[in-house]
Amino acid sequence: MTTKTYTIPNISCNHCVHTIKSEVSEIPGVTSIDADVFTKKVTIIFDNPATEEIIKSILAEINYPVAE
Protein backbone atom coordinates (compact mmCIF):
# COMPACT_ATOMS: atom_id res chain seq x y z
CA MET A 1 0.00 0.00 0.00
CA THR A 2 1.10 3.54 -0.79
CA THR A 3 -0.10 6.65 1.05
CA LYS A 4 0.22 10.04 -0.64
CA THR A 5 -0.93 13.46 0.49
CA TYR A 6 -1.54 16.13 -2.11
CA THR A 7 -2.27 19.84 -1.83
CA ILE A 8 -5.20 20.82 -4.03
CA PRO A 9 -5.74 24.61 -3.96
CA ASN A 10 -9.15 24.40 -5.70
CA ILE A 11 -10.87 22.73 -2.72
CA SER A 12 -13.24 25.36 -1.35
CA CYS A 13 -16.30 23.55 0.03
CA ASN A 14 -17.79 20.22 1.04
CA HIS A 15 -19.10 19.73 -2.49
CA CYS A 16 -15.47 19.76 -3.68
CA VAL A 17 -14.58 17.13 -1.09
CA HIS A 18 -17.52 14.97 -2.16
CA THR A 19 -16.61 15.26 -5.85
CA ILE A 20 -12.99 14.30 -5.22
CA LYS A 21 -13.92 11.35 -3.02
CA SER A 22 -16.55 10.14 -5.48
CA GLU A 23 -14.31 10.30 -8.55
CA VAL A 24 -11.07 9.03 -7.01
CA SER A 25 -12.80 6.14 -5.25
CA GLU A 26 -13.72 4.79 -8.71
CA ILE A 27 -10.03 4.16 -9.51
CA PRO A 28 -9.26 0.46 -9.06
CA GLY A 29 -6.77 0.00 -6.24
CA VAL A 30 -7.74 3.10 -4.24
CA THR A 31 -8.71 1.96 -0.75
CA SER A 32 -9.05 5.22 1.21
CA ILE A 33 -9.48 8.95 0.57
CA ASP A 34 -9.51 11.75 3.09
CA ALA A 35 -9.99 15.35 1.94
CA ASP A 36 -9.98 18.49 4.07
CA VAL A 37 -11.52 21.81 3.01
CA PHE A 38 -9.50 23.87 5.48
CA THR A 39 -6.01 22.49 4.78
CA LYS A 40 -6.77 21.83 1.09
CA LYS A 41 -5.07 18.45 1.49
CA VAL A 42 -6.15 15.09 0.12
CA THR A 43 -4.65 11.86 1.46
CA ILE A 44 -5.10 8.77 -0.67
CA ILE A 45 -4.16 5.18 0.14
CA PHE A 46 -3.77 2.99 -2.91
CA ASP A 47 -2.19 -0.12 -4.35
CA ASN A 48 -1.89 -1.64 -7.82
CA PRO A 49 -3.35 -1.10 -10.33
CA ALA A 50 -3.72 2.54 -9.14
CA THR A 51 -0.67 4.74 -9.63
CA GLU A 52 0.21 8.27 -8.65
CA GLU A 53 0.06 9.28 -12.31
CA ILE A 54 -3.48 7.92 -12.71
CA ILE A 55 -4.65 9.67 -9.55
CA LYS A 56 -3.14 13.01 -10.56
CA SER A 57 -4.62 12.66 -14.03
CA ILE A 58 -8.13 12.04 -12.70
CA LEU A 59 -7.85 14.96 -10.28
CA ALA A 60 -6.78 17.24 -13.13
CA GLU A 61 -9.65 15.99 -15.32
CA ILE A 62 -12.21 16.94 -12.67
CA ASN A 63 -10.61 20.40 -12.22
CA TYR A 64 -8.79 19.68 -8.96
CA PRO A 65 -5.16 19.61 -10.11
CA VAL A 66 -2.45 18.82 -7.58
CA ALA A 67 -0.19 21.74 -6.63
CA GLU A 68 3.42 20.95 -7.41
Image (tube, rainbow, N blue to C red):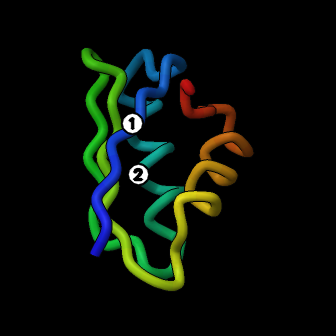
Q: Which residue is mark 2?
A: 21
Q: Is residue 42 above or below residue 37?
A: below
Image quarter hosting the C terminus? top right
Q: Are marks 1 and 2 in contact (CB under 8 Å)?
A: yes
Can you name the residue that lies furthest to the right here? Answer: 61
Is 46 left or right of 59, judged from the image as shown? Answer: left
Q: Position of residue 23 (x, y in %)?
A: 54, 57
Residue 17 location, x and y as percent?
Answer: 39, 36
Q: Is residue 35 above or below residue 49?
A: above
Identify the residue at image location x=26%, y=15%. 38
- The quadrant holding residue 7 is top left
Question: Foreground residue, 20 or 66?
Answer: 66
**Amino acid at dot 1:** Val
Mark 2 crowd level (few <14, some 14–19, many ≥20, 10 Å Cα): some
SS class of the residue under badge 1?
helix
- Quadrant where the N terminus sits is bottom left
Left of 65 or right of it: where is 35? left
Q: How many numbered markers are drawn? A: 2
Residue under label 1? 17
Q: Which mark is residue 6?
A: none
Residue 48, image x, y percentages: 46, 84
Identify which residue is drawn at 55% across, 25% down: 67
